[in-house]
Image (cartoon, rainbow, N blue to C red):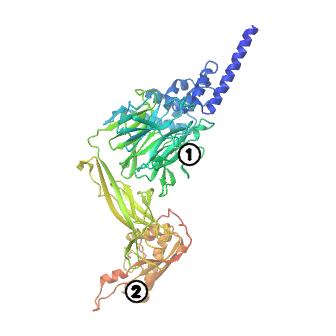
Amino acid sequence: MRYLFFVLALFLLSSCSVEKKAMKAFNRGEYQNAIGLFQKTLSKNPGKANYFIAESYRQSNRIKEAELYYANAKGIGINKDTVQYHYAQALKANAKYAEALVQLNNLAENAEDDKLKRLANAQISGLKEVESLKQQKSYYRVRNLEALNTAAGEYSPAYLNNELYFTSNRGSGRIYEAEGKPFSNIYKVGSRGANVDLNTLAPLPPVINTEGVNDGCVTFSPDGKIMVFAKGNTGKKKGSEDVDLYISRFRNGEWMPAQPITGSVNSPGHWESTPGFSPDGRTLYFSSSRPGGQGGLDIYSARMDSRGRFSQVRNLGSEINTPGDEYFPHMAEDGKLYFSSDGHAGFGMLDIFVVNRVNGRNVIQNLGEPVNSSADDFGIFLFKPDRGFLTSNRSEGKGDDDVYTFVNEDPNLRVINYYLQGIVYTPDKEGKLQILPNTKVSLLDNKRESMTDYVTGNDGKFLFRVYGDEDYELFGELSGYLTKRQPYTTKGKSVDPATLKELVTNITLDTILVMDRIELNKIFVLENIYFDFDKSDITPQAAVELNKLVDILKDNGEIKIEMGSHTDSVGTQDYNIQLSQRRAESTVRYLINSGISQERLTARGYGETKPVARNTNPDGTDNPVGRARNRRTEFKIVEIGEVIRPVSEEAEFDEDKYFKGDGN
C-alpha cells in the first residue's frame, strides 16, 4: 500500500511538473513544444489541456487542427464565449458551415462580451453569403506549382525580372518552437511565368536571410532596386511580436545589408509584415497589429519620398479592414488592391479579395472558388492582368502552404488604366505662366480625402492614377504660394471596355494647376459674384464662388484680406460708395458665417472710383460690357502673418439670412 501511495505521489508530482513546463512553453510562444507537453496532461486535467492545445494550434496558424480540442475545452478561468467563437472558426475552417452557424447563433444571442457578439454576427452574415459565393461563376483556373513545392511551407510569391521569389521553411536548420518547423528564409528561382528552373533555386544571401530568424514576405520596387521584407520571430520571449519590416537596396550588382525601416512604419512591440509596393513604387502597403485599427491585423499604407524615406502611415479604413485579420496586400498593375482576410464573407479561413472602384467608392469582392477554399488562401501576386501566383494550404497540396499558379480566362476581361498628368505653373509679373517646381500636389476624392500625393521636380510635372467616371480635386501646396484647390472629373472621359480589343489599354488625361504667389496688396478678382440691381444680398450663384474663397482662406490661414466691392457709374458717386460698402460687408458676413475669423477680414466699398473698363463709349453712348466688368468683387492680401485657424471647419451656410431680399 505504501508503495502504491509513493508511485501515485510521484505521478502527481510528475504531472504538475509537466503542466508547469507546458505553461512556460506556451507563455514563451513555443506552441509546438506546448502542444506535446499538454498532450501528456490530458488525462489529469482534460478541460484545461484541451484549451491550451487548441490555443497553441490557433496561435501558430493551424486552427483547423484545433477543432476537436476547442470542443472539449473548459475550466476555471477559461472564457467559454471566447472558446465557442474560436470553435466556430475551426469548424468553418474545416468547411463545417452548418455546425459553425449553430455555434455562432448561440454566441450572438448569449455572449456577455459586446465585441464577441459583433464578431459572431459578422461571421453569421459571412456564412449566409457562402452559398451565393459558391454559385458565383468563375473563369479562374488554379493549379499547384508542383515543381516548386515540398512537404515544407512555400508561400508569399513575388515575381521580378523572370525570377520567382518566395518564402519557405524547407531545410533542416534551427527549429522555430512556435510552429515546430525550421525558421523561414527567402528563396528565388528562375521562372518564365509559371515555368520554374529548379537548377537556379537558391536562398538569398546572408545579408538578407539571418540564421535563427524568420525572414520572408518580400516585395520589390518596380525598378527592382529596393527590397522590403519581414524579419523576426527570434524564438526569444515575446518573439512572436518582434516582426518588423526591413529594407535593402541593390547596388553594384548585389543587395546591401538589410536594415529596419526607420520612421513610423515599424511600431515597437507590434507585428508588421506582408509588405507590397504599389506599381509606381511610391506607396508601401503592409499589415500591422498596432493599436488604433479596426481590430486584429489591419492593412496600412506609407508614402516613400524621393530620398527613399517612408512616412504618412495611414490605416486603409473600415471598408477594407475588419475586426478580423487583413494582410498580404498586393496592388496590381490595373490599380486594384488585392488582399487576404478572415473578416469579410468567405469560405473558411483566409480568403483572397479584390477592391473594385464603383461610383467613387470601394467595393470588396471575394474572388470565389477555385481561388478560395475552406483553407487559408493568401499571398496573391499578378505578374500579368490575367495570371499570377497565390498561396494555399488546401488539402490537395503537398502538406503545408504551397504556391499555386492561376489564369483568369474571362473572355470579357479588359483592363483600362487611367492616368492624370499635369504641370504646375505660376504667373510672372507680366502674367505669363512659368513652370513651378518642388510643389506638393495631392489627389483628393469626392469626399476631399487624400488618395495620393506627388512632389514635382524641376519640370513641374505630376502624375496620378485615376478611375473612370469619378470626381476629384487637385490640392497644390508650396511655401510662399496660395494653396490651390482645383476640381477635376473623369466623367465623360471614360472608355467603354466593350469597344476594346487589347487586354490592357492605358489612357492619359492632361491638366494644369496654376499657383499664385502670396504678395502684399495683390488683387484677385472673384468671377461670377453678381448682385441683383441695387441690392447687396448674396445670391445662390454668388455663394458658389464665395465658397471657393472660403476654401482659400481656410487653406491659407496666414493671410488677411480686404474684400473690395466696385460698381459702375450708374447713380451718384455717394450712393455707389454706400451700395458697394453694403455689398462688401455682405460678402464679409458670408465668410464669417462660413467659419472665417472676423479679424482676418476687412470690407471696403470703392463705388465707381476704380474702374477697369470704360462705362461709356468715346461717343458718350452706354458701354454695357464695360459696366459689367466694373461691377466686380475682389479680394486683396493686406497682411501676411501667423496662421489663424478657422472658427469652424464645419460652419453651415445660413440660408434664411443670405438667400432673401432686403429691399436695398
Q: In which quarter of the image is residue 374?
A: top left
**Residue 14 higher or lower than 417, as above or below:** above
Verify CB contact (< 8 Å) between mark 2 and mark 1.
no
**Residue 657 higher or lower than 248, as above or below:** below
The percent position of residue 114, horizontal first and vertical second, equals 56, 39
The disc labelled 2 sits on which kind of residue?
Glu
Q: Can residue 319 be seen in this view?
A: no
The percent position of residue 622, horizontal first and vertical second, equals 29, 87
SS of the residue at dot 1? Answer: loop
Q: Quadrant of residue 486?
A: bottom left
Residue 435 or 547: which is nearer the viewer? Answer: 435
Residue shown at 29% from the left, 58% from the top: 493
Q: Is residue 356 left or right of residue 643?
A: left
The percent position of residue 362, horizontal first and vertical second, equals 40, 48
Q: Is residue 625 visible?
A: yes
The Cα atoms of the two marked residues, 2 and 1, are separated by 63 Å
Q: Which residue lies furthest to the front in this view?
A: 252
Residue shown at 32% from the left, 42% from the top: 386
Residue matched to label 1 = 290
Q: Is residue 538 left or right of residue 44?
A: left
Query: Looking at the figure, which quarter contains the N terminus?
Result: top right
Q: In which quarter of the image is residue 13?
A: top right
| Mark sitting on residue 608 | 2
Tell me how many marks there are. 2
Classify mark 2: residues with Cα within 10 Å, few (<14), some (14-19) or many (20+): many
Residue 664 or 231: which is nearer the viewer? Answer: 231
SS of the residue at dot 2? Answer: loop
The percent position of residue 287, horizontal first and vertical second, equals 50, 44
The disc labelled 1 sits on which kind of residue?
Arg
Instruction: Tell us which disc is closer to us: 2 or 1.
Output: 1
Q: In this view, does 295 lie to the left or right of 378?
A: right
Query: Looking at the figure, which quarter contains the C terminus?
Result: bottom left
